[in-house]
Image (tube, coloured by chain):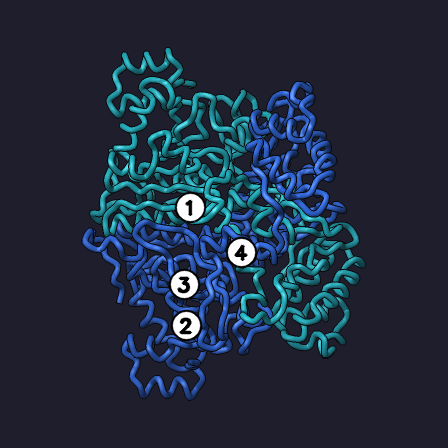
Chain colours: A cyan, B blue
Amino acid sequence: MSHMTSAPDVSNAAKAPLEGLRIIDLTQVVVGPYATQFLADFGAEVIKIEHPTGDLARWIGGKSTTPGMAAKYLHLNRNKKSIALDLKKPGAAEALKKLIVTADVVIHNMRPSAAARLGLSAQDLLELKPDLIYCSVVGFGQGGRYKDKPAYDSIIQGASGLAAINNGGDGEPRFVPMVIADRTVGIMVANTILMGVVQRLRHGGPQIIEVPMFESMTAFVLAEHLFLKTFDPPLGETGDSRLLNPNSRPIRTADGYICVTANTDEQVFAMFDAMGRSDLRTDPRFAEKRARFENIGEMFRIRNEIFASRTTAQWLEILEAADVPAMPLHTLDSVLDDPHLADTRLFQPIDHPTEGKIINLRNPIQFSSYEPSLKWPAPLIGQHSIELLRSVGVSDQDIEAMLESGATVNHC
Amino acid sequence: MSHMTSAPDVSNAAKAPLEGLRIIDLTQVVVGPYATQFLADFGAEVIKIEHPTGDLARWIGGKSTTPGMAAKYLHLNRNKKSIALDLKKPGAAEALKKLIVTADVVIHNMRPSAAARLGLSAQDLLELKPDLIYCSVVGFGQGGRYKDKPAYDSIIQGASGLAAINNGGDGEPRFVPMVIADRTVGIMVANTILMGVVQRLRHGGPQIIEVPMFESMTAFVLAEHLFLKTFDPPLGETGDSRLLNPNSRPIRTADGYICVTANTDEQVFAMFDAMGRSDLRTDPRFAEKRARFENIGEMFRIRNEIFASRTTAQWLEILEAADVPAMPLHTLDSVLDDPHLADTRLFQPIDHPTEGKIINLRNPIQFSSYEPSLKWPAPLIGQHSIELLRSVGVSDQDIEAMLESGATVNHC
């Protein structure tokens, strides 16, 4: 049963912000699971509906200690419950509907036509639960001609313009080497569910939400790079020339790479001094913000040349004394040894019931009344099947039949 | 005055989800403004506090029709009000405090020591407004040794490991050519404010929230790439080899580039057939998921070679018939002509009072009871100074004095 009410309960301010919010999560792989993990970290009860063969991320995310527990899956599904349901087998669809009646939110990322075929359209579910928050993550807005196209991260990276500009080195387009469209839109999805919750607490439900990946990611990219074509007629070209300049990059030092930011006059002049080029302070190309913007490539080029002469540690010392923001470049391995991250305990060693000792990436956001914590690590397929089926009144006899037919499974 | 109450108001379900939520926004440039624009799009009243010289993004975001209205700023500040306040001049700090008393949320991204010097620590503000949601976006968690370091997007990209892996072409680390750490964390910030709002509606305030950029972005990157070092002892190296493979990229065709995704057996086999290489279906390197993961580089290499033989349009036709997900690569310019985005009206021509006709990037997320809309375009510096000062009881005489001393300005 949903425990979410709108009655203020000031006596209990230390509760997790989303405690009692029940989310039925029909998504898999990245975009949906990333969204719901954010909510689970802050107390939402996320019930992950999995086909008995499991979320694809269990399998395409690399080796694991036991099958189907890839690292990628582990980092996307902590604090969730898993119930395995094969919706094409007897009893499963009925059980899902019983769960939905108890829920505040349903989220899926099926194509809308597929959801409808399974009886999971917004209309279907609002009949079951009239104040439901129904969130569908779609590849493409349902008001446009691509509405039935399938979407995947790399397709959205390519279609949004992101891969075209990520062309350092040789001018060839490249994906950002992360499932970054899925992850970015995933955080937006968490936002929209939360706004649906706020709306429902204040004005009641239901709410039907559509988050289109292509449009969302294109707006994300073009808010940066529509640039001078924002104006009509255009004041120039698309693309922020400062960010796209090939010399805007981690700077090679005598023994590694350093990242330096100097935006204000103060920072830039201090950097010139530190470089032994105080003369550039009065150089008309660099003496003020607007001129520097026009000549940014040249400024980066001069900077990058001079930085090759000293080690990273030497530059860090010089720049710190000059109050110019700088940090060394981390690799995926060196960041694991960063002393600040040890102080703030980002890497949290935990025991997983089947995977042994693993490193959890702690959610680093802090609330004064709540610190997001690990309630339990990512579940096995159907780890909570029995408990959840019982909780909505499915009899032990029926559960037995579902286990036998493969309508559910129960790994633990 | 804040109009946010917890009383359900079912009669008015068509209201914007965040209507009546008042946010005092002391942030500038990207991370904070991106967060609050998301909230403003959904009805929050965002009051942007600017120094009379204006948000830095007004100036470093490229040319504009009138000074201080760069495209980058325009895409980060629609639907907000601007009040100009120089907190070091008489009357300004008092006016800010009067505004804070009326607010639900205060957000800033100053270093905590700087906020304290200005009398804007959480403690200071909770004395003014005991149920405030106070959100500070910091570069580095305050529990660690970098707590006083300044943070900028490129420094966080470098420190999180993202720049190190974005090394296509020549192996040299490169920034993703977007202010992507700021933007990604910005969406997370919107999430946390919304969770604070949910918490306050249910259990009352206050709430003090800290969002550390370094930790948040590192967790974002490593959820993908901690990979086999998630396990202790490690099962292998960091880095998802599939995403980091140099052949995992937009594919060159005879006349351009295409992006193709084939994950499931069905998709992969259909792609092999479409490539005229049905023999690969039974090749032990590619016949099943696990084997393909091990040999993904080789599969990508074969694919990329064959795709050079036909045009993008030819491949799209072949792949669509085979039900293999594919789309052409868009550039920053070609995406502006995408017909689906015309259908869904992502690019919204609007009139800006000083900039003339500009293209607004519509927020593409849809609620059944609300479509995020443009209330007004990004404001001039202090466009709402007079209105807001009057609203909290500053007399016309005092406003006059503030205008004279430069404690506020009033562009319109």
Q: How far apart are marks 1 and 2 (CA)?
A: 35 Å
**Residue ID for mark 2:** B82
Both on one chain, marks 1 and 2?
no
**Residue ID for mark 1:** A142
The residue under the point 55% across, 41% down is A153
Q: What residue type is labelled 3?
A: Ser
Residue A385 horizontal/vertical position (percent) = 36, 22
Q: What residue type is labelled 1?
A: Gln
Q: How far apart are marks 1 and 4 (CA)?
A: 30 Å
**Residue ID for mark 4:** B182
Task: Please report contact status of discs 2 and 3: CB closer than 8 Å, yes or no.
Answer: no
Residue nearer the viewer, B74 or A155: A155
Describe the element under mark 2 as helix, strand or loop.
Answer: strand
**Residue ID for mark 3:** B121
Describe the element under mark 3 as helix, strand or loop.
Answer: loop
Q: Mark 4 lies on which chain?
A: B
Is residue B202 toward the left or the right of residue A212 in the image?
A: left
Q: Which of marks 1 and 3 is in front?
A: 1
Q: Which amino acid does label 4 sit on?
A: Asp
Q: How far apart are marks 4 and 3 (CA)?
A: 22 Å
Residue nearer the viewer, B316 or B10: B316
Image height of A331 relative to B134, above or below: above
